[in-house]
Amino acid sequence: MESQLGLIQNSFLTQYTNWVYEALDELPHNFTITDPCVSGHPIVFVSNGFLKMCGYSRDDVIGRNGRMFQGPKTNRRSVMEIREAIREERESQVSLLNYRRDGRPFWMLFHMSPVFGEDGRVIHFVAVQVPIVRRRVVCSGSGFVGKSGEVCDHGFNSGEVLMGACRREVCSDSAGGLGRGLVFDNVVDSDEGAEVEDACEASEIEKQKASATTSNILSVLAHYSELTGRSVSGSRCRSHGTGLLCSALKISLGRIKQSFVLIEPHLSNMPIVYASDSFLKLTGYARHEVLGCSHIFLSGLDTDTSTSSKVNGRIHAGQPCTVRLLNYRKDRTAFWSILHVSPVRNASGKIAYFVEVHAKEDEKEQAGNVSSPKSKHLSVVGAVKVAVRSLSMGPGASKS
């Protein structure tokens, strides 16, 4: 049975070869890779450059959500833009105020891009962080004076002034006279105690650097995924898409801790399109081994076929049911499960999915009492329904 750490490790090892770690570690960029399919949307890879920039160790970061780097001055609108991009499974580029481990804030350009598998599902998100470089610029007379005191006759000395974009300008000619000049605090470094309320904009060079870095990382992932036969790409193959779940729904479902799967009833084999972490722990399967399988794939030699047929009949009729069923784990050990199947409707009232809740029967339930897990079944079904309906009626519903 997989632990949370095992799920995180499998997030990479099932998609890429072991060599991908070494290849990514050699890149000089600051970036993280997250998995929306694992509960909590955790970070599953972090670059050495990012760790050096933020002061964290790898153990501090792996398995945590990216929210850990936010703080009291982080702009909520920027965070919402990132969430909407995750929901819509698209790229996003925003200026963001994050915090280092010692509590010091710093401005960075946050560039996020989805990574798609061959079946069109989003399997990872790559998040590149480019620090926004800032310098203080002084205007004196007809020219500009950089930090070194050198005058730039026609604007900026490219050797001394890097345009970041804290748009905070202080004009002091009226207060202190012409001799003191004009100070443009374009780039006051927040590490030196500057105020951080004013939003910073990245330069075009920094934006281009973020895009190029993302492309470089995607190329590495694509190369090492091809060696496993599971190619990835920065764009979705348009021939796929039926029965796919958007990342926002996966993240919402990941908060539900019980054992369950979501199935697509409108396809011929009624495949599984989502499997919870608890279900994977219960059955011993990895996520990629479950997704796309028929919902009855746990059946075995001694599984009652009439009970399985009853479940299929209720699904075709759009009705719920609860049964006691003998299932088999990946290692072929058998276990009794109290299986509850229920339709899940979207905001328009149409059946979008069926949820199957698997409650393992313990010794004192083996007398055949199937009512004891009822409250657990109902709580899971209710949570799944809320997640599906809220997404389908929300302003940022996925277009995938």
Image (cartoon, grey):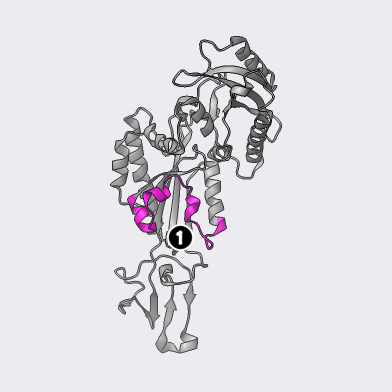
The magenta segment: 48-77
Q: Quadrant of residue 5?
A: top left
- Whether residue 141 appears in magenta in the rendering, the answer is no
Residue 353 % position (x, y) = 62, 28
Towards the viewer: 21 or 87: 21
Magenta stretch holds residue 75: yes
Q: Which residue matches tag 1?
A: 99
Picture coordinates of residue 24 (x, y %)? Answer: 32, 44
Pointer 1 local density, CA inside 10 Å: few below 14, some 14–19, many at least 20: many
Q: Is residue 80 left or right of residue 47?
A: right
Q: Confirm whether residue 266 shows in the render.
A: no
173 or 362: nearer the eye?
362
Identity, as a three-letter code, of the amino acid under mark 1: Tyr
- Percent x, y of residue 72: 54, 62
Q: Compared with residue 176, is residue 45 higher up or lower down, i.e. above or below? A: above
Q: Is residue 195 left or right of residue 10?
A: right
